Amino acid sequence: MLEGLADHCAETMAAYGCASVSVAVAHLDRVVFAEAYGLADVAEGRAATSETAYLIASVTKPITATAVCVAADRGLLNLEEPVEKYLPGFRLPRYRDYSAPTLRQVLQHRAGFASHYDFAYAASPAAVSTTWQSIERYGTLYREPGSRFEYSNLGYGILDTVLEAATGQSAGDFVGDQVFGPLGLTSCHLGPSYREAGREALRYSADGRPYPVYDTTHRGASLAWGTAADLAMFGLSQAGGRTVLKPETAAAMRTALPVNAHHGYGLGWFVSRGGPQPVVSHSGGMGGVSALLAVVPDLRLSVCVLTNHTGAETRTSVVNHVMTQLVPDFTPASLPPSVSPECAVAVPQGTWEGHVHTDTGAVPLVLRVGPDAQVEVGLDGGEAVRADFVTASDDWDLRVSAPLQIPTTDARVNSPQLVLELNARHGRLIGAARAMKNGEGDGWLGNCLSHWCEVAPV
């Protein structure tokens, strides 16, 4: 089975400097292949095995979504109710008269939240934020709920809080008791560190540095662990295998609204569009981690590939090798991520002025849009600088990056770059000003912290 896989993994790991890769295939009702290649701990020379647990980044999302749907099946919550019902006494911030998003819209990344991720590294002097602090600072609604897809880890962090309010358990305990336990996923765990030291794959940067332990305010989006074999069995729960959900609820998780030409997104799962047979999947990537779980319901087949390395190259190459052998007429376009193509910038030339709204106050912002889409950006009264890049897409009328620091305590920790993603609405440009970091070259992966932004022509 899987002819040439060992050689392919060895060649691909060497090409990209990846420490290890773990591969598992489940079919019908059992694991039919599970192997790992390379090192789980480079310094110790500890080999990766099929029993090695990996952090799985955003492949955590379908697990959290399953837990939310279990709670719904048991009448503990209602997916059609506003998420604010489960955030007692709290109203999500908004700068327009937007309605409250439902739990279903949060699961679908259509709640109106912005892109977000945050990581708190061990031994860092920065104060660690709580999930509630993150919701208060960054849980702004950027558009009418249901109007558009925008992938947001923050939404799945909010679902952790919802599970706690609805069930009386921590999200990690509820997931363990109601998803991992009943499905027999004995290796799986939710949290910043694996529960059994020495059984996990350590995480490595793109240039081979071991990552410290890190936590986040969106554990339900990013911090599940497991072996490839157990995760492949979890995938079978969407392909007629053992499940913790009512049949109609499992089917609803695969009912996807369109995201782009290749994919829709259901309740925690991407679903391919237009191919010979649907593929239900989720990818994940963050500091020292790249993962992908792909399920072909018509074949009752599930494939999981995990690596302990920043960057998706090894993972993607191995997934394509495996899926090409097992799935007739497979095309890589059936797997995430896929991005919206760039298009020409159509924002009128001239000077635009307004503010970035942060938790510590409004920060003045100036945009000067010149000929040939040349843009200068000034922030907080400082000298305007030329943007590093200027583009547009089906999602944003203007996307700009500049080496400017949003002056908040959170942004100063590990997010020195300003990215503006704005749409033209009623003569203004509105959207998000994101504090970000490009890669991990001078440390570790940074954060993406979004703030409401609005400018008008002068």
Image: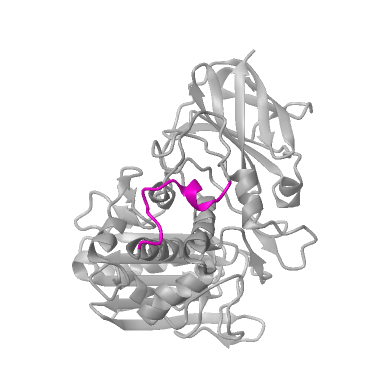
Question: Residue 408: horizontal and vertical position, in percent?
Answer: 75, 42
Overall secondary structure of the magenta stretch?
loop
* Residue 27 vertical placement versus 281 (above, below): below
Does residue 291 appear in the picture of this structure? yes
* Residue 134 vertical placement versus 395 (above, below): below
Which one is in front, 40 or 166?
166
Left or right? Give the position of 416 relative to 304: right
Among the 4 quarters of the image, the one containing residue 202: bottom right
Residue 92 lies within the magenta run = no
Residue 76 lies within the magenta run = yes
Which one is in front, 199 or 340?
199
Image quadrant containing the N terminus: bottom left
Question: Residue 334: horizontal and vertical position, in percent?
Answer: 31, 55
Question: Residue 40: horizontal and vertical position, in percent?
Answer: 56, 80
* Residue 190 vertical placement versus 197 (above, below): above
Q: Which residues are magenta?
A: 75-89
* Residue 282 vertical placement versus 243 (above, below): above
